[in-house]
Amino acid sequence: MSKVQANCLLLLAAAFWGFGNVAQKTVLDHLDPLSAVGMRCLIAGLMAAPLTGLE
């Protein structure tokens, strides 16, 4: 991996991190923390469910 590719990937990871924090803050403005965590777990479970069928 070249230095330019590594820097671009690092910048992309930082952007995802920042956008995730903005999204989490927005969700917490509308829901209580327990509901927000439950919703994140539900979404993660729904995303992982098809992968369990492949195994």
Image (cartoon, grey):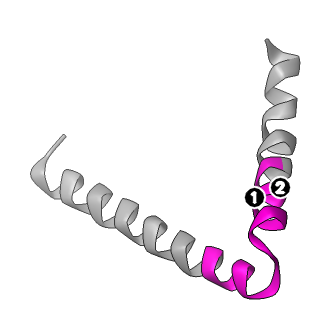
Circle 1 residues within 10 Å: few <14, some 14–19, many ≥20: few
- Residue kind at label 1, given as amino acid type: Val
* Residue 43 picture location, percent across and down: 82, 52
Please give the name of the residue rendered at 76% of the width and 45% of the height, measured from the top-left corner: 44
Give me the C-alpha separation between circle 1 and circle 2.
4 Å
Q: Main secondary structure of the magenta part?
A: helix
Q: Nearer the viewer, residue 43 or 54?
A: 43
Please give the name of the residue rendered at 63% of the width and 74% of the height, measured from the top-left corner: 24
On the rendered image, what quadrant is the C terminus found in? Answer: top right
Quarter of the image where one finds residue 28: bottom right
Q: 46 above or below 34?
A: above
Circle 2 residues within 10 Å: few <14, some 14–19, many ≥20: few
Dot 2 corresponds to which residue? 38
Q: Nearer the viewer, residue 3 or 38?
A: 38
Q: 32 above or below 38?
A: below
Please give the name of the residue rendered at 11% of the width and 52% of the height, measured from the top-left corner: 3
The reply to whether dot 1 and dot 2 touch (C-beta < 8 Å) is: yes
Dot 1 corresponds to which residue? 37
- Residue kind at label 2, given as amino acid type: Gly
Quarter of the image where one finds residue 30: bottom right
Q: Which residues are magenta?
A: 24-41
* Residue 49 picture location, percent across and down: 86, 32
Query: As drawn, which residue projects farthest toward the left?
Result: 3
* Residue 21 picture location, percent across and down: 53, 74
The secondary structure type at the circle numbered 1 is helix
